[in-house]
């Protein structure tokens, strides 16, 4: 096994859910370079449909997506009794977004564009919970 494969085997799976393909690819590359195993999904429903697969150690979740928003996905997971640490990402830096994220017990909220190190830091905190 390569050094990167050994490192990924020790770190939890991170699920990236964002409707923007370029964002998903960029985040997946960044997280893999930090040694995480990554699965990416283009919608909240696509993520829900995959729930028979291994559970992630953390979700990196876009707030605003067509169909089901990130906040609605989080509520749905809680309704199902699933507690997964969530790092929300959004391009909409509004007071309402921050209030909603805080009220829901989110591990982190990052506003696009954000620094790669900021994402890695908050994901590291999320998987340490």
Image (cartoon, rainbow, N blue to C red):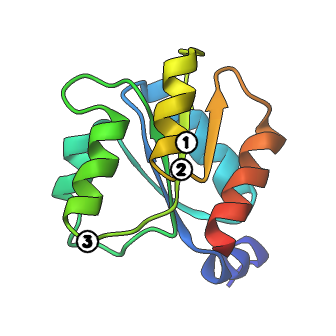
Q: Dot 2 corresponds to which residue?
A: 106
Please report contact status of discs 1 and 2: CB closer than 8 Å, yes or no. Answer: yes
Residue 44 point in image, percent of width and height: 27, 42
Residue 126 point in image, percent of width and height: 63, 63
Q: For this rendering, which residue is in front, 65 or 100?
A: 100
| Residue drawn at (65%, 75%) of the image | 11
* Residue 83 as seen in the image, left or right of residue 13: left
| Residue drawn at (49%, 20%) of the image | 96
* Residue 75 as seen in the image, left or right of residue 112: left
Q: For this rendering, which residue is in front, 85 or 2?
A: 85
User: How far separated are the C-alphas under marks 3 and 1?
Assistant: 19 Å
Instruction: Give the image quarter of residue 12.
Output: bottom right
* Residue 53 as seen in the image, left or right of residue 67: right
Sooner in the amino-acid sequence: mark 3 or mark 1:
3
| Residue drawn at (32%, 25%) of the image | 65
User: How far separated are the C-alphas under marks 2 and 3?
Assistant: 16 Å
Which of the two discs, 3 and 1, sits closer to the camera?
A: 1
User: How far separated are the C-alphas under marks 1 and 2?
Assistant: 6 Å
Q: For this rendering, which residue is in front, 37 or 101?
A: 101
Q: Dot 3 corresponds to which residue?
A: 81
């Amino acid at each position: 096994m390569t050094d990167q494969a050994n490192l990924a085997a020790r770190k939890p799976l991170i699920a990236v859910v964002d409707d923007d393909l370029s964002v998903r690819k960029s985040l997946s590359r960044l997280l893999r370079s930090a040694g995480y195993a990554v699965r990416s999904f283009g919608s909240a429903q696509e993520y829900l449909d995959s729930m028979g697969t291994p559970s992630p150690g953390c979700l990196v979740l876009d707030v605003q997506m067509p169909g089901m928003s990130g906040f609605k996905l989080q509520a749905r997971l809680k309704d199902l009794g699933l507690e997964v640490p969530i790092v929300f990402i959004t391009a909409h830096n509004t007071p309402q977004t921050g209030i909603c994220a805080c009220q829901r017990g989110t591990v982190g909220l990052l506003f696009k564009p954000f620094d790669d190190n900021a994402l890695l830091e908050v994901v590291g905190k999320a998987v340490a919970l």
